[in-house]
Amino acid sequence: MLVFNYFSYLCTERFFPEDENLGNMEFIDPSVYERADEGLRQLIKRAEVGALSEKEYDQYEASMKLLADEIDMEKQGYERGMADGMQQGIAQVAKEMKQNKMPVEVIMEVTHLTKEEIDNL
């Protein structure tokens, strides 16, 4: 584990940005990737990133930010969809309670809707 952490430090800090050996990741046998556990895959990824030129690294960082932004927007959309769905479900339950002649006070207590919202159903 000490070797992994030290190597990760070197790659992350870009200690050897000019080292040609780190830049030759395409010469690694593809079967290494297939057999690698998660720790080795992370190590390989860090080595690949550490071997990037400054311009390539800036492009990589920009692409990672775009990806993070896309994931965030997708998460926000999911959460908004869930909230909208919950509101629709609550309105449907309140409407059915109203149709079954339940007291408005009970509907308000169960659904947390206002009297005006219930009256508009």
Image (cartoon, grey):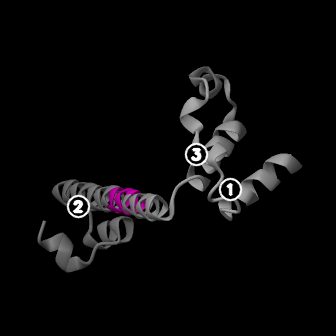
Q: Quadrant of residue 116?
A: bottom left
Q: Are marks 3 and 1 in contact (CB under 8 Å)?
A: no
Count of residue discs: 3
Identified by mark 1, the residue type is: Cys
Which residue does the numbered mark 2 point to in the structure image?
Answer: 91
**Crowding near the residue tagged with mark 1, few <14, some 14–19, many ≥20 C-alpha atoms within 10 Å:** many
**Could you tell me residue 34's position as x and y percent?**
60, 23
Indicate which label's residue lies in the foreground, 2 or 1: 1
Q: Is residue 43 above or below residue 110?
A: above
For the record, the magenta segment spans 67-76
Residue sitting at x 33%, y 62%: 73
Between residues 58 and 88, which one lies in front from this camera angle?
58
Which residue does the numbered mark 1 point to in the structure image?
Answer: 11
**Could you tell me residue 114's position as x and y percent?**
26, 78
Indicate which label's residue lies in the foreground, 3 or 1: 3
Dot placed on the residue nearer the N-terminal end, 2 or 1:
1
Which residue does the numbered mark 3 point to in the structure image?
Answer: 23
Residue sitting at x 73%, y 58%: 10
How far apart marks 2 and 1 lie (CA) works out to 55 Å
How far apart marks 3 and 1 lie (CA) works out to 11 Å
Q: Is residue 71 above or below residue 109?
A: above
Q: Is residue 8 above or below residue 43?
A: below
Residue sitting at x 19%, y 74%: 117
Identified by mark 3, the residue type is: Gly
Dot placed on the residue nearer the N-terminal end, 3 or 2:
3
Identified by mark 2, the residue type is: Ala
Q: Residue furthest left?
A: 120
Q: Is residue 19 above or below residue 115?
A: above
Q: Is residue 63 left or right of residue 11?
A: left
**Could you tell me residue 111's position as x and y percent?**
34, 66
